[in-house]
Image (cartoon, rainbow, N blue to C red):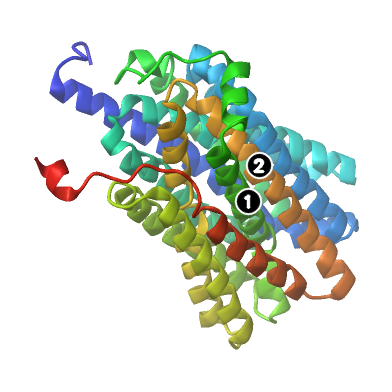
Amino acid sequence: MSDVKSPVNRQLAVWIVLLAAAATFALTMGTRQTMGLFLSALNTSTGLGVGSISLAFAFGQLWWGLTQPFAGAFADRVGAGRVLFLGVVLVALGTFITPFMTTTAGLIFAIGVLAAGGAGMAGPAVLMAATARLIPADKRGMATGIVNAGGSFGQFLMAPIAGALMVSVGWASAMQVLACIVLLALPAAFFLKGNPVQVGAASSAPPLATGAAIRQALQTPSFLMLAGGFFVCGFHVAFLATHLPGVVASCGLPTQWGAWSLAMLGLFNIVGSIAMGWAVGRWRMKSLLSLVYATRAVAVVVFLLAPKTGPVVLVFAAVMGLTFLSTVPPTAGLVAKFFGVGNMATLFGVVMLTHQVGGFLGAYLGGKVFDATGSYNWIWYVDIALAVGAALIHLPIKEAKLPSRAVVAA
Protein backbone atom coordinates (compact mmCIF):
# COMPACT_ATOMS: atom_id res chain seq x y z
CA MET A 1 0.00 0.00 0.00
CA SER A 2 2.92 2.32 -0.67
CA ASP A 3 1.03 4.08 -3.44
CA VAL A 4 -2.45 4.55 -2.01
CA LYS A 5 -3.46 6.50 -5.14
CA SER A 6 -3.07 3.41 -7.31
CA PRO A 7 -6.50 1.86 -8.08
CA VAL A 8 -5.20 -1.61 -7.21
CA ASN A 9 -3.68 -0.51 -3.93
CA ARG A 10 -6.73 1.57 -3.07
CA GLN A 11 -8.98 -1.45 -3.65
CA LEU A 12 -6.66 -3.61 -1.54
CA ALA A 13 -6.79 -1.05 1.28
CA VAL A 14 -10.58 -1.07 1.12
CA TRP A 15 -10.76 -4.85 1.42
CA ILE A 16 -8.24 -4.94 4.27
CA VAL A 17 -10.32 -2.45 6.24
CA LEU A 18 -13.56 -4.29 5.45
CA LEU A 19 -12.14 -7.66 6.51
CA ALA A 20 -10.55 -6.23 9.65
CA ALA A 21 -13.80 -4.56 10.67
CA ALA A 22 -15.89 -7.65 9.83
CA ALA A 23 -13.55 -9.96 11.77
CA THR A 24 -13.62 -7.68 14.81
CA PHE A 25 -17.39 -7.56 14.77
CA ALA A 26 -17.52 -11.35 14.29
CA LEU A 27 -15.52 -12.06 17.44
CA THR A 28 -17.06 -9.42 19.72
CA MET A 29 -20.65 -9.86 18.55
CA GLY A 30 -20.30 -13.64 18.35
CA THR A 31 -19.21 -13.77 21.97
CA ARG A 32 -21.90 -11.37 23.22
CA GLN A 33 -24.70 -13.13 21.35
CA THR A 34 -23.83 -16.54 22.85
CA MET A 35 -24.13 -15.32 26.44
CA GLY A 36 -27.80 -16.31 26.57
CA LEU A 37 -26.65 -19.94 26.52
CA PHE A 38 -25.03 -19.43 29.92
CA LEU A 39 -28.06 -17.88 31.64
CA SER A 40 -29.41 -21.17 32.99
CA ALA A 41 -25.96 -22.30 34.17
CA LEU A 42 -25.36 -18.98 35.90
CA ASN A 43 -28.71 -19.28 37.61
CA THR A 44 -27.95 -22.81 38.81
CA SER A 45 -24.47 -21.81 40.00
CA THR A 46 -25.41 -18.58 41.80
CA GLY A 47 -29.04 -19.21 42.76
CA LEU A 48 -29.81 -15.55 42.02
CA GLY A 49 -32.88 -16.18 39.87
CA VAL A 50 -33.49 -15.56 36.17
CA GLY A 51 -34.77 -12.04 36.83
CA SER A 52 -31.61 -10.94 38.69
CA ILE A 53 -29.28 -12.46 36.11
CA SER A 54 -31.35 -10.90 33.33
CA LEU A 55 -30.69 -7.53 35.00
CA ALA A 56 -26.96 -8.01 34.40
CA PHE A 57 -27.59 -8.89 30.76
CA ALA A 58 -29.98 -5.96 30.42
CA PHE A 59 -27.50 -3.53 31.94
CA GLY A 60 -24.99 -4.82 29.41
CA GLN A 61 -27.37 -3.96 26.59
CA LEU A 62 -27.73 -0.43 27.96
CA TRP A 63 -24.03 0.07 28.66
CA TRP A 64 -23.12 -1.22 25.20
CA GLY A 65 -25.23 1.58 23.79
CA LEU A 66 -24.00 4.23 26.23
CA THR A 67 -20.36 3.65 25.32
CA GLN A 68 -20.88 4.02 21.59
CA PRO A 69 -21.45 7.80 21.27
CA PHE A 70 -18.31 8.42 23.36
CA ALA A 71 -16.28 5.76 21.56
CA GLY A 72 -17.52 7.17 18.26
CA ALA A 73 -16.59 10.73 19.22
CA PHE A 74 -13.11 9.57 20.23
CA ALA A 75 -12.71 7.60 16.98
CA ASP A 76 -13.89 10.63 14.97
CA ARG A 77 -10.92 12.54 16.38
CA VAL A 78 -8.07 10.01 16.66
CA GLY A 79 -9.09 7.05 14.52
CA ALA A 80 -10.47 3.63 15.32
CA GLY A 81 -7.32 1.67 16.21
CA ARG A 82 -6.85 2.70 19.85
CA VAL A 83 -10.56 2.44 20.57
CA LEU A 84 -10.79 -1.06 19.09
CA PHE A 85 -7.71 -2.34 20.93
CA LEU A 86 -9.03 -1.30 24.32
CA GLY A 87 -12.50 -2.56 23.53
CA VAL A 88 -11.33 -6.06 22.57
CA VAL A 89 -9.24 -6.35 25.74
CA LEU A 90 -12.21 -5.35 27.91
CA VAL A 91 -14.51 -7.89 26.21
CA ALA A 92 -12.01 -10.66 26.90
CA LEU A 93 -11.45 -9.58 30.51
CA GLY A 94 -15.14 -9.28 31.37
CA THR A 95 -15.98 -12.63 29.80
CA PHE A 96 -13.07 -14.39 31.52
CA ILE A 97 -13.95 -13.27 35.05
CA THR A 98 -17.72 -13.81 34.79
CA PRO A 99 -17.60 -17.38 36.23
CA PHE A 100 -16.03 -15.99 39.41
CA MET A 101 -18.96 -13.64 40.05
CA THR A 102 -21.53 -14.86 42.59
CA THR A 103 -23.65 -11.73 43.14
CA THR A 104 -25.87 -9.61 40.93
CA ALA A 105 -23.48 -6.68 41.33
CA GLY A 106 -20.54 -8.85 40.29
CA LEU A 107 -22.35 -10.08 37.19
CA ILE A 108 -23.31 -6.51 36.29
CA PHE A 109 -19.66 -5.49 36.56
CA ALA A 110 -18.28 -8.39 34.51
CA ILE A 111 -21.02 -8.79 31.90
CA GLY A 112 -22.63 -5.38 31.94
CA VAL A 113 -19.67 -3.01 32.40
CA LEU A 114 -16.46 -4.68 31.20
CA ALA A 115 -17.59 -7.05 28.45
CA ALA A 116 -20.48 -4.95 27.16
CA GLY A 117 -18.54 -1.69 27.38
CA GLY A 118 -15.64 -3.21 25.48
CA ALA A 119 -17.99 -4.57 22.83
CA GLY A 120 -19.47 -1.08 22.52
CA MET A 121 -16.02 0.40 21.93
CA ALA A 122 -15.38 -2.25 19.28
CA GLY A 123 -18.95 -2.04 18.03
CA PRO A 124 -20.83 -0.85 14.97
CA ALA A 125 -20.60 2.90 15.62
CA VAL A 126 -16.80 2.82 15.23
CA LEU A 127 -16.67 0.02 12.66
CA MET A 128 -19.43 1.36 10.38
CA ALA A 129 -17.95 4.86 10.42
CA ALA A 130 -14.49 3.55 9.56
CA THR A 131 -15.85 1.77 6.49
CA ALA A 132 -18.27 4.55 5.46
CA ARG A 133 -15.45 7.08 5.33
CA LEU A 134 -13.35 4.87 3.12
CA ILE A 135 -16.01 3.73 0.67
CA PRO A 136 -17.66 5.90 -2.04
CA ALA A 137 -21.23 6.87 -1.19
CA ASP A 138 -22.81 4.50 -3.73
CA LYS A 139 -20.94 1.51 -2.23
CA ARG A 140 -21.48 2.23 1.47
CA GLY A 141 -24.60 0.09 1.73
CA MET A 142 -22.81 -3.04 0.58
CA ALA A 143 -19.74 -2.20 2.71
CA THR A 144 -21.80 -1.84 5.88
CA GLY A 145 -23.67 -5.00 4.93
CA ILE A 146 -20.36 -6.91 4.74
CA VAL A 147 -19.23 -5.63 8.14
CA ASN A 148 -22.64 -6.41 9.62
CA ALA A 149 -22.49 -9.90 8.12
CA GLY A 150 -19.21 -10.38 9.98
CA GLY A 151 -21.05 -10.05 13.27
CA SER A 152 -23.65 -12.51 12.06
CA PHE A 153 -21.01 -15.01 10.98
CA GLY A 154 -19.45 -14.70 14.43
CA GLN A 155 -22.74 -15.64 16.05
CA PHE A 156 -23.23 -18.55 13.65
CA LEU A 157 -19.72 -19.81 14.43
CA MET A 158 -19.49 -19.10 18.16
CA ALA A 159 -22.87 -20.41 19.33
CA PRO A 160 -22.21 -24.08 18.38
CA ILE A 161 -18.64 -23.76 19.70
CA ALA A 162 -19.95 -22.45 23.01
CA GLY A 163 -22.55 -25.22 23.18
CA ALA A 164 -19.95 -27.91 22.48
CA LEU A 165 -17.55 -26.44 25.04
CA MET A 166 -20.27 -26.37 27.69
CA VAL A 167 -20.89 -30.07 27.18
CA SER A 168 -17.21 -31.05 27.07
CA VAL A 169 -15.45 -28.78 29.62
CA GLY A 170 -18.28 -27.18 31.59
CA TRP A 171 -19.89 -23.78 31.34
CA ALA A 172 -17.22 -21.83 33.30
CA SER A 173 -14.27 -23.10 31.27
CA ALA A 174 -16.31 -22.65 28.07
CA MET A 175 -16.80 -18.97 28.88
CA GLN A 176 -13.09 -18.48 29.54
CA VAL A 177 -12.13 -20.18 26.28
CA LEU A 178 -14.44 -17.76 24.47
CA ALA A 179 -12.65 -14.90 26.23
CA CYS A 180 -9.32 -16.06 24.80
CA ILE A 181 -10.80 -16.43 21.32
CA VAL A 182 -11.92 -12.78 21.38
CA LEU A 183 -8.27 -11.68 21.64
CA LEU A 184 -7.77 -12.86 18.05
CA ALA A 185 -9.40 -9.55 17.03
CA LEU A 186 -6.49 -7.47 18.39
CA PRO A 187 -4.51 -7.35 15.09
CA ALA A 188 -7.47 -5.59 13.44
CA ALA A 189 -6.67 -2.50 15.50
CA PHE A 190 -3.42 -2.17 13.56
CA PHE A 191 -5.17 -2.19 10.17
CA LEU A 192 -7.73 0.34 11.38
CA LYS A 193 -5.28 2.63 13.17
CA GLY A 194 -5.01 6.31 12.43
CA ASN A 195 -7.73 8.63 11.19
CA PRO A 196 -9.82 6.82 8.55
CA VAL A 197 -10.54 10.12 6.81
CA GLN A 198 -6.90 10.21 5.69
CA VAL A 199 -7.03 6.76 4.12
CA GLY A 200 -9.92 6.84 1.76
CA ALA A 201 -12.52 9.04 0.25
CA ALA A 202 -12.80 12.55 1.56
CA SER A 203 -15.65 13.40 3.85
CA SER A 204 -18.51 15.23 2.24
CA ALA A 205 -18.15 18.02 4.78
CA PRO A 206 -15.76 18.89 7.62
CA PRO A 207 -16.95 17.44 10.93
CA LEU A 208 -18.77 19.63 13.42
CA ALA A 209 -17.92 19.80 17.09
CA THR A 210 -19.46 16.83 18.89
CA GLY A 211 -22.03 18.88 20.81
CA ALA A 212 -23.08 20.84 17.74
CA ALA A 213 -23.50 17.67 15.69
CA ILE A 214 -25.67 16.04 18.37
CA ARG A 215 -27.82 19.17 18.76
CA GLN A 216 -28.37 19.34 15.01
CA ALA A 217 -29.39 15.68 14.92
CA LEU A 218 -31.80 15.99 17.85
CA GLN A 219 -33.53 18.88 16.08
CA THR A 220 -34.11 16.76 12.96
CA PRO A 221 -37.48 14.94 13.07
CA SER A 222 -36.39 12.25 10.62
CA PHE A 223 -33.41 11.43 12.84
CA LEU A 224 -35.69 11.12 15.87
CA MET A 225 -38.07 8.80 14.03
CA LEU A 226 -35.12 6.71 12.87
CA ALA A 227 -33.89 6.46 16.46
CA GLY A 228 -37.40 5.51 17.64
CA GLY A 229 -37.49 2.62 15.20
CA PHE A 230 -34.05 1.49 16.28
CA PHE A 231 -35.28 1.43 19.89
CA VAL A 232 -37.74 -1.27 18.81
CA CYS A 233 -34.98 -3.14 17.01
CA GLY A 234 -32.95 -3.19 20.24
CA PHE A 235 -35.89 -4.53 22.25
CA HIS A 236 -36.42 -7.33 19.77
CA VAL A 237 -32.76 -8.27 19.24
CA ALA A 238 -31.82 -8.25 22.94
CA PHE A 239 -34.84 -10.31 23.90
CA LEU A 240 -33.96 -12.96 21.32
CA ALA A 241 -30.23 -12.97 22.07
CA THR A 242 -30.82 -13.30 25.81
CA HIS A 243 -33.94 -15.44 26.03
CA LEU A 244 -34.27 -17.48 22.83
CA PRO A 245 -32.50 -20.46 24.48
CA GLY A 246 -34.96 -20.07 27.36
CA VAL A 247 -37.88 -19.91 24.93
CA VAL A 248 -36.62 -23.14 23.33
CA ALA A 249 -36.22 -24.79 26.75
CA SER A 250 -39.75 -23.73 27.74
CA CYS A 251 -40.96 -25.62 24.67
CA GLY A 252 -39.49 -28.81 26.23
CA LEU A 253 -36.60 -29.08 23.75
CA PRO A 254 -32.97 -30.02 24.65
CA THR A 255 -30.19 -27.43 25.11
CA GLN A 256 -28.71 -28.19 21.71
CA TRP A 257 -31.79 -26.77 20.01
CA GLY A 258 -31.18 -23.50 21.85
CA ALA A 259 -27.58 -23.36 20.64
CA TRP A 260 -28.58 -24.15 17.08
CA SER A 261 -31.38 -21.60 17.14
CA LEU A 262 -28.79 -18.91 18.00
CA ALA A 263 -26.58 -20.27 15.23
CA MET A 264 -29.48 -20.04 12.76
CA LEU A 265 -30.02 -16.42 13.79
CA GLY A 266 -26.40 -15.71 12.94
CA LEU A 267 -26.32 -17.71 9.71
CA PHE A 268 -29.41 -16.12 8.20
CA ASN A 269 -28.39 -12.71 9.47
CA ILE A 270 -25.42 -13.01 7.11
CA VAL A 271 -27.87 -13.44 4.24
CA GLY A 272 -30.07 -10.63 5.51
CA SER A 273 -27.16 -8.23 6.01
CA ILE A 274 -25.65 -8.81 2.56
CA ALA A 275 -29.07 -8.65 0.90
CA MET A 276 -29.88 -5.41 2.70
CA GLY A 277 -26.51 -3.95 1.75
CA TRP A 278 -27.38 -4.66 -1.89
CA ALA A 279 -30.94 -3.35 -1.52
CA VAL A 280 -30.11 0.06 -0.02
CA GLY A 281 -28.63 1.15 -3.33
CA ARG A 282 -31.85 0.28 -5.16
CA TRP A 283 -34.74 1.21 -2.89
CA ARG A 284 -35.34 3.92 -0.33
CA MET A 285 -33.90 2.94 3.02
CA LYS A 286 -36.92 4.02 5.05
CA SER A 287 -39.15 1.68 3.00
CA LEU A 288 -36.76 -1.22 3.55
CA LEU A 289 -36.80 -0.59 7.31
CA SER A 290 -40.61 -0.57 7.38
CA LEU A 291 -40.61 -3.89 5.53
CA VAL A 292 -38.18 -5.46 8.01
CA TYR A 293 -40.21 -4.48 11.07
CA ALA A 294 -43.48 -5.61 9.49
CA THR A 295 -41.87 -8.97 8.67
CA ARG A 296 -40.86 -9.40 12.32
CA ALA A 297 -44.39 -8.80 13.52
CA VAL A 298 -45.84 -11.35 11.12
CA ALA A 299 -43.15 -13.94 11.94
CA VAL A 300 -43.79 -13.72 15.70
CA VAL A 301 -47.54 -14.12 15.21
CA VAL A 302 -46.98 -17.24 13.09
CA PHE A 303 -44.53 -18.67 15.64
CA LEU A 304 -46.99 -18.23 18.50
CA LEU A 305 -49.67 -20.08 16.54
CA ALA A 306 -47.38 -22.89 15.30
CA PRO A 307 -46.57 -26.15 17.15
CA LYS A 308 -43.32 -25.80 19.13
CA THR A 309 -41.10 -28.47 17.57
CA GLY A 310 -37.37 -28.36 16.86
CA PRO A 311 -37.73 -27.72 13.11
CA VAL A 312 -40.32 -24.99 13.75
CA VAL A 313 -37.93 -23.28 16.17
CA LEU A 314 -35.11 -23.39 13.61
CA VAL A 315 -37.32 -22.02 10.82
CA PHE A 316 -38.46 -19.22 13.12
CA ALA A 317 -34.84 -18.46 14.05
CA ALA A 318 -33.94 -18.38 10.36
CA VAL A 319 -36.70 -15.87 9.55
CA MET A 320 -35.72 -13.75 12.54
CA GLY A 321 -32.12 -13.98 11.38
CA LEU A 322 -33.01 -12.45 8.02
CA THR A 323 -34.33 -9.39 9.85
CA PHE A 324 -32.12 -9.55 12.96
CA LEU A 325 -29.46 -6.93 12.19
CA SER A 326 -30.42 -6.15 8.61
CA THR A 327 -31.69 -2.86 10.04
CA VAL A 328 -28.10 -1.67 10.55
CA PRO A 329 -27.05 -0.90 6.91
CA PRO A 330 -30.10 1.27 6.09
CA THR A 331 -30.00 2.95 9.51
CA ALA A 332 -26.31 3.75 9.16
CA GLY A 333 -26.94 4.79 5.58
CA LEU A 334 -29.67 7.23 6.59
CA VAL A 335 -27.44 8.79 9.25
CA ALA A 336 -24.73 9.34 6.63
CA LYS A 337 -27.32 10.61 4.16
CA PHE A 338 -28.74 13.12 6.66
CA PHE A 339 -25.48 14.52 8.03
CA GLY A 340 -22.50 13.24 6.00
CA VAL A 341 -19.73 11.03 7.33
CA GLY A 342 -17.69 13.60 9.27
CA ASN A 343 -19.60 12.96 12.49
CA MET A 344 -21.04 9.59 11.60
CA ALA A 345 -19.40 7.59 14.40
CA THR A 346 -20.81 10.01 16.97
CA LEU A 347 -24.31 10.26 15.51
CA PHE A 348 -24.65 6.57 14.74
CA GLY A 349 -23.49 6.03 18.31
CA VAL A 350 -26.43 8.15 19.49
CA VAL A 351 -28.81 6.02 17.42
CA MET A 352 -27.19 2.89 18.85
CA LEU A 353 -27.83 4.25 22.33
CA THR A 354 -31.58 4.32 21.67
CA HIS A 355 -31.23 0.80 20.27
CA GLN A 356 -29.67 -0.35 23.52
CA VAL A 357 -32.24 1.37 25.72
CA GLY A 358 -34.71 -0.87 23.93
CA GLY A 359 -32.25 -3.73 24.40
CA PHE A 360 -32.16 -3.15 28.15
CA LEU A 361 -35.95 -3.42 28.34
CA GLY A 362 -36.09 -6.47 26.08
CA ALA A 363 -33.48 -8.41 28.05
CA TYR A 364 -34.67 -7.36 31.52
CA LEU A 365 -38.43 -7.56 31.03
CA GLY A 366 -38.06 -10.93 29.35
CA GLY A 367 -36.65 -12.38 32.56
CA LYS A 368 -39.06 -10.55 34.85
CA VAL A 369 -42.13 -11.58 32.87
CA PHE A 370 -40.96 -15.20 32.80
CA ASP A 371 -40.37 -15.18 36.57
CA ALA A 372 -43.84 -13.71 37.14
CA THR A 373 -45.86 -15.80 34.69
CA GLY A 374 -43.74 -18.84 33.81
CA SER A 375 -44.12 -17.92 30.14
CA TYR A 376 -42.72 -15.50 27.54
CA ASN A 377 -46.07 -14.91 25.85
CA TRP A 378 -46.67 -11.37 27.14
CA ILE A 379 -43.25 -10.25 25.91
CA TRP A 380 -44.09 -11.64 22.48
CA TYR A 381 -47.33 -9.64 22.47
CA VAL A 382 -45.43 -6.44 23.34
CA ASP A 383 -42.87 -7.25 20.65
CA ILE A 384 -45.58 -7.58 17.99
CA ALA A 385 -47.08 -4.22 18.91
CA LEU A 386 -43.69 -2.50 18.89
CA ALA A 387 -42.77 -4.01 15.52
CA VAL A 388 -45.99 -2.73 13.95
CA GLY A 389 -45.31 0.71 15.42
CA ALA A 390 -41.75 0.70 14.07
CA ALA A 391 -42.98 -0.25 10.60
CA LEU A 392 -45.28 2.77 10.63
CA ILE A 393 -42.92 5.34 12.17
CA HIS A 394 -40.40 5.05 9.33
CA LEU A 395 -42.90 6.00 6.64
CA PRO A 396 -42.88 9.80 7.35
CA ILE A 397 -39.06 10.00 7.32
CA LYS A 398 -37.92 12.52 4.71
CA GLU A 399 -35.56 10.70 2.40
CA ALA A 400 -34.84 11.88 -1.10
CA LYS A 401 -35.99 9.56 -3.83
CA LEU A 402 -33.28 7.52 -5.52
CA PRO A 403 -32.39 8.50 -9.08
CA SER A 404 -33.93 6.33 -11.76
CA ARG A 405 -31.88 3.38 -12.96
CA ALA A 406 -31.59 4.98 -16.41
CA VAL A 407 -29.94 8.04 -14.83
CA VAL A 408 -27.61 5.84 -12.76
CA ALA A 409 -26.62 3.88 -15.84
CA ALA A 410 -25.91 7.07 -17.76
Left or right side of 44 for 127: left
168 to 95, vertically: above or below: below
Residue at 51% x, 27% y is 345
Q: Depth check: 368 or 229 in front?
A: 229
Picture coordinates of residue 167, whole percent (x, y)? 64, 63
Q: Few, some or many C-alpha atoms within 10 Å of disc 2 (few <14, some 14-19, many ≥20)? A: many
Residue underneath mark 1: 234
Q: Few, some or many C-alpha atoms within 10 Å of disc 1 (few <14, some 14-19, many ≥20)? A: many
Residue underneath mark 2: 354
Residue 186 appears in the rendering: no
Q: Depth check: 218 or 78 in front?
A: 218
Q: Amino acid at mark 2?
A: Thr
Picture coordinates of residue 250, whole percent (x, y)? 73, 77
33 to 344, vertically: above or below: below
Asked if the residue at tag 1 contacts the one at tag 2, i.e. Cβ–Cβ closer than 8 Å, the answer is: yes
- Image quadrant in which the N terminus is located: top left
Quarter-of-image position of residue 236: bottom right
Residue 302 appears in the rendering: yes
Q: Amino acid at mark 1?
A: Gly
Residue at 68% x, 40% y is 95
CA gap between label 2 and label 1 equals: 8 Å
Residue at 58% x, 51% y is 229
Residue at 37% x, 25% y is 133
Quarter-of-image position of residue 100: top right
Foreground tag (2 vs 1) = 2
Picture coordinates of residue 309, whole percent (x, y)? 58, 85
**First along the sequence among labels 2 and 1:** 1
